[in-house]
Image (tube, rainbow, N blue to C red):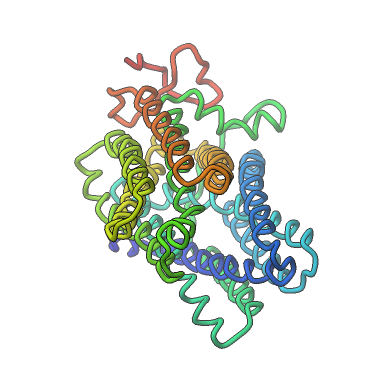
Amino acid sequence: MLSVLRNRTYRHLFLAQVIALIGTGLATVALGLLAYDIAGARAGSVLGTALAIKMVAYVAIAPAISAVADRIPRRALMVGADLTRAGVALSLPFVGQVWQVYVLIFALQAASAAFTPTFQAVIPDVLPEERDYTQALSMSRLAYDLENLFSPALAAALLAFMSYNWLFLGTVGGFIASAALVVSALLPTPVPAAKREGSAYTKATAGSRLFFVTPRLRALLALNLAVAAASAMVTVNTVVYVRDHLARSTTDVALALGSYGAGSMTVALLLPRILDKVTDRAVMLRGALLLTVVFAALGIVTAAGGGGWRWPALLGTWAAFGAACSMVLTPTGRLIRRSAPPQERTSAFAAQFSLSHVCWLLTYPLAGWLGAQAGLQAAVIALGAIAFIAAVTAVRLWPADDTDGRPRVRSGLDPAPFHREPARSAR
């Protein structure tokens, strides 16, 4: 899989992604400590609000950027986003009010909402061969999982020698290095974007409309919801399971999260070979259906009154969640590349970025509120039901004969705005 790094342009872009992710991880740790300094016991509510602001920025800004992305060189857009993020990170140590944190977090995440879809849309042009592109998607998945494991450990090591404010400087350095690597990469000339008529709103929602008229992308919307239900359960309630439900140490919180990452990384490493033989549809739908089985297993662990088996069972459940989520998330880029012509890819990736975070905006607070107010079992049942309904919906929306990878839209809807091929019968 590492052979894809022989491509100089992709190697520079991948390193830019990794370094920026490490910087973001350092900022996440530092932001929690900053919130505690400013708000004390209210730090949790501050971080919760900051997380909600992050999701709102992702949902609102990505489509807006896609409406004007064809007027801005991709290199300039990504470098500008990195430098904006560096400037915001440099400002964070100097804030003294909660509202200032919120404003800067919105600016930081708005820049991320501009960078990420643009970056994702560039990679298919850099790696036109599907096998190489599949390997790149697995590399990207690994980068996210390793960041979740490596950044907190690095932050803990650095905090032994310095105050948390210095972590923000690490974030600044990461974004500047990312910008430098993007500048050094020789990006291919993009296919000119199709001229879109209509209002700014029409242009901003072009990618979203593409999702709603393409059967496999409508299925992807449901798959995003299934993944969000599972990931929210892990992200929000791991500490509750480990510390309160199982009465284990804080170190075990990191171990549980590491199990989730290990499951995800294992699948990401295996998928390039599997996808040579199995369709995206088969892998992604099985991953979504597996999530419902894992939720059932988690319900058993949650309902159990005691027993030493519950801790290894929780670790196995978290690893299975990570594996199932990776089965859905890793091939997503292939699906979008096959469903959108080159001139529409930025809009399509922006739509995926925005719409997937709508799902997070729903499941994050639901996982936290139900877990706190009605108990963990109620959260498992509610989120498990969401995952089950979403998985079954995806199976029904994605035609079983959709195996050739060609763009397809639902009969009766005008494909002209997206320059699609004539629709074939979905059944």
Residue extending furthest toward the top: 412
Residue depicted at 52% across the width and 27% down the height: 418
Quadrant showing the C terminus = top left
Q: Does the rendering let one see residue 245? A: yes
Q: Nearer the viewer, residue 49 or 186?
A: 49
Is 61 left or right of 240, judged from the image as shown? right
Q: Is residue 219 above or below residue 380?
A: above
Q: Position of residue 166 (x, y in %)?
A: 63, 80
Residue 41, by quadrant, is bottom right
Q: Nearer the viewer, residue 153 or 191?
A: 153
Q: Outermost residue, bottom direction?
A: 161
Residue at x 22%, y 39% (from the top left corner): 278
Between residue 310 and residue 271, name the one nearer to us: 310
Residue 24 position within the rendered picture, expressed as x and y whole percent measured from the top left? 56, 65
Residue ranking furthest to the front:
305
Using the rendered view, name the quadrant where residue 247 is placed: bottom left
Where is residue 125? Give x, y as percent: 43, 48
Where residue 171 sits in the image (x, y, percent)?
Answer: 59, 71
Compared to 400, does 319 lie above or below? Answer: below
